[in-house]
Structures are given as structure tokens and as C-alpha cells.
Image: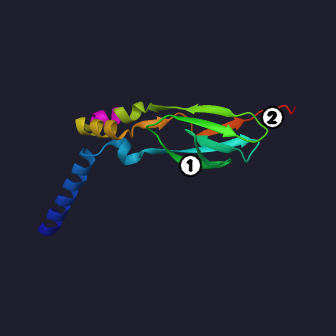
Amino acid sequence: MNKFFHHSSVFALILVVSFIFTSCATLFKGSTDTVSFSSDPSDTKVYVNGIFLGTTPFQIELKSNHSYTIEFKKEGYGTKTVLLNNSVGAGWIVLDIFGGVIPVIIDAATGNWYNLDQEHINAILEQQQSR
């Protein structure tokens, strides 16, 4: 019984310390958000910050502590540009404050308390006039 109590106490201490030295957003959210892309017409090329990432429809994980310029391009259609911004999730800050100073520092340093403003981006491209 004494050995069980000792092991339980050590486990409880490790659990408490791990919660104190980590932060809410780092524990429960992580540093990325899933964003899905679709378009009309489909099979449109998607460029994120100038880098080709795929053809619609698709989804991808993007770092939530960055903002992005999304471009939809298809032959015979005008380019559609969308800005994907981020913002700090107020709920993560409140939870971190309840945890103490260390969780606030960790989430601020890692940027894990940011969320992207959109989970789905749909672009409707306009067909260019033929000459």
C-alpha cells in the first residue's frame, strides 16, 4: 500500500508540473489550423504566399501565427486574391492567465494562441472575355 501511495504521488506531481509548465493553447490546439480550399470552377490552382500548394478542392494545415495571401488561378479566368489573417484567441489568453505567468509566456513565444480567421475559402472566378 505504501508503494502504491508513493507511485501515485509521483504520478500526480508529474501531472501537475506538466500542466504548470505548458500552456492551454499548446496543450489543446497546437500551432496549425486546417484550411480547406474550393472554387468555381473547380480544378483551380491555389498559391499561398506565391507558392503553388494544390488544385481545388483540397485542404492543408497552415501555421496559425502567420497571415497569408491566397491566389486562385485558372487559364481563361481572372485571378482571385484572398487575404487570410490571424487573430489571438481571447479564450486561450484567459485560460493561460489562470495557469500563471509561465503558460502566458509559452503561448506568446510559440504563437499557439493564434487562430486563422477562416477555415474554408471558396473563390468564384470570373471568365475572361475572349478577343
Q: Residue, x 74% and y 35% (percent of image)?
A: 125
Question: What percent of the width, then of the height, locates residue 68?
Answer: 53, 36
Q: Residue, x 49% and y 34% (percent of image)?
A: 67
Question: What percent of the width, then of the height, locates residue 17?
Answer: 21, 50
Dominant secondary structure (helix, strand or loop) of the stretch shown in magenta: helix
Quarter of the image where the N terminus is located? bottom left
> Which of the marked residues, 1 or 2, is nearer the chain's N terminus?
1
- Labelled disc at residue 60: 1
Q: What element carries label 2?
A: loop
Q: Residues within 10 Å of mark 2 (few under 14, many from 20)?
A: few
Give 25 or 112, whichever is nearer the viewer.
112
Q: Residue, x 80% and y 34% (percent of image)?
A: 127
- 47 vs 12, left or right, is right
Question: What percent of the width, then of the height, locates residue 104?
Answer: 29, 35
Rounded to the nearest whole Å, what is the CA distance between mark 1 and mark 2?
27 Å
Which residues fall within the magenta stretch?
Answer: 94-98
Q: Nearer the viewer, mark 1 or mark 2?
A: 2
- 53 vs 95, left or right, is right
- State the scheme by which the image is colored: rainbow
- Labelled disc at residue 125: none
Quarter of the image where the C terminus is located? top right
- Please give the residue where the numbered disc 2 appears in the rendered image: 127
75, above or below 94, in the image = below
- Magenta span includes 97: yes
- 2 vs 105, left or right, is left
Identify residue type, mark 1.
Answer: Ile
Identify residue type, mark 2.
Answer: Gln
